[in-house]
């Protein structure tokens, strides 16, 4: 019994394809251009290096411009939000000051009223 | 391939580049046995093997401008044939491969050059996992080195080595057992 290696070599020796193989390949070439797979069809127009680079550059440019526009828009929105926030704080401070003043005046009048009630002569004078 | 044959293929490639279709026919004739046998040994179907081989040569025709030499051509043909054959098997067998252990052991003993032994070995090889089977075919049909197989199949050389070792071990064990303990 031959070793396994030799058995495999014998088993897997090259075999010629059925007669007329070359002619069948050539006739397929002659009859119709080889049909490209969808991916190859898509990539066929990209075989020209200059076109490929131009498309790649255009895509990069569009991406960069879109990024810049988006960034500027975000900056504008943030500035507007900060301005609105500052205005709201100022309005609150003003309101607070006015309320303080009103409260102070009310307390003053209340105190005066109490004093008058405790000493009626003072009012008559 | 010897140096003269290499030069003939190089010359045919140059003529192909100039649009000579008869030169392409020469290239097909020179390599058809290699391409067809790779597909046939892997797929076990002469019809499918011829189909794959024709497709490989048509793809070669489209890719001729990228082929640099006879050696590159041989590498390219082996690589494309391997990948197309593996793809074809995977598409037609979505439920995975048979395991070698699943194959019933042949009952009777056999002798060297016994057609029955060849048939048994053929069946056992056919049940190897796809990548191991292709590695074995490249190793024994094409007498390729491990490094070359790794490049063609695009897998690490250690994977190739372990696949072949394991496949041979399994084949040897199965055959030995089927022959009543006679080592092969």
Image: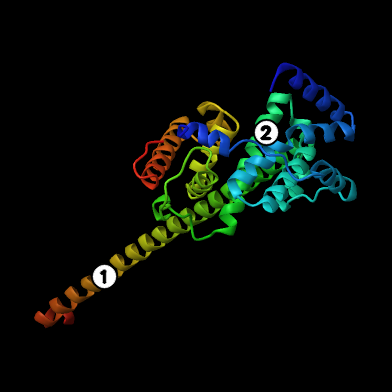
Q: Say whether residue B65 is left or right of residue B94.
A: right
Q: Say whether residue B80 is left or right of residue B16.
A: left
In this rendered view, identify the residue nearer to me: B100 or B65.
Answer: B100
The C terminus of chain B lies in quadrant: top left
Q: Which mark is residue B128?
A: none
Residue B157, image x and y in percent?
47, 30
Query: What's the residue at 74%, 49% (across, down)?
Result: A42
The local secondary structure at tag 2 comes to helix
Q: Share a chain, discs 1 and 2?
A: no
Query: What crowding class fits label 2: few (fewer than 14 Cα within 10 Å), some (14-19), or many (20 or more)?
Result: some
The N terminus of chain B lies in quadrant: top right
Q: Which mark is residue B76?
A: 2
Q: Say whether residue B90 is left or right of residue B3.
A: left
Query: What's the residue at 45%, 36% (across, down)?
Result: B164
**Image quadrant in which you'd find residue A117:** bottom left
Label 1: chain?
A: A
Q: Which mark is residue A103?
A: 1
In this rendered view, identify the residue nearer to me: B133 or B152.
Answer: B133
Residue A108, image x and y in percent?
22, 70
| Distance in Å between CA atoms under marks 1 and 2 | 94 Å
């Amino acid at each position: 019994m031959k070793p396994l290696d030799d058995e495999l070599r014998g088993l897997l020796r090259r075999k010629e394809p059925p007669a007329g193989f070359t002619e069948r390949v050539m006739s397929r070439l002659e009859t119709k251009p080889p049909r490209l797979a969808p991916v190859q069809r898509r990539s066929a127009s990209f075989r020209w290096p200059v076109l490929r680079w131009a498309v790649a550059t255009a895509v990069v440019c569009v991406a960069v411009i879109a990024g810049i526009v988006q960034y500027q828009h975000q900056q504008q929105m943030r500035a507007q939000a900060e301005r609105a926030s500052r205005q709201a704080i100022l309005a609150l401070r003003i309101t607070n000051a006015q309320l303080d003043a009103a409260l102070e005046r009310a307390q003053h009048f209340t105190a005066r009223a109490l004093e008058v009630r405790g000493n009626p002569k003072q009012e008559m004078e | 391939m010897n140096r003269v044959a290499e030069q003939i293929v190089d010359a045919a490639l140059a003529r192909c580049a100039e649009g000579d279709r008869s030169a392409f026919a020469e290239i097909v004739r020179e390599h058809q046995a290699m391409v067809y046998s790779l597909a046939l040994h892997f797929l076990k179907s002469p019809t499918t093997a011829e189909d794959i081989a024709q497709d490989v040569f048509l793809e070669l025709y489209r890719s001729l401008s990228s082929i640099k030499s006879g050696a590159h051509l041989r590498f390219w043909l082996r690589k494309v044939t391997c990948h197309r054959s593996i793809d074809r098997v995977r598409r037609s067998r979505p439920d995975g491969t048979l395991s070698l252990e699943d194959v019933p052991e042949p009952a009777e003993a056999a002798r060297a050059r016994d057609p029955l032994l060849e048939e048994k070995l053929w069946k056992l090889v056919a049940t190897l996992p796809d990548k191991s089977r292709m590695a074995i075919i490249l190793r024994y049909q094409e007498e390729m080195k491990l490094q070359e197989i790794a490049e063609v199949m695009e897998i690490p050389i250690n994977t190739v080595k372990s696949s072949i070792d394991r496949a041979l071990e399994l084949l040897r064990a199965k055959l030995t057992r089927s022959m009543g303990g006679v080592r092969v």
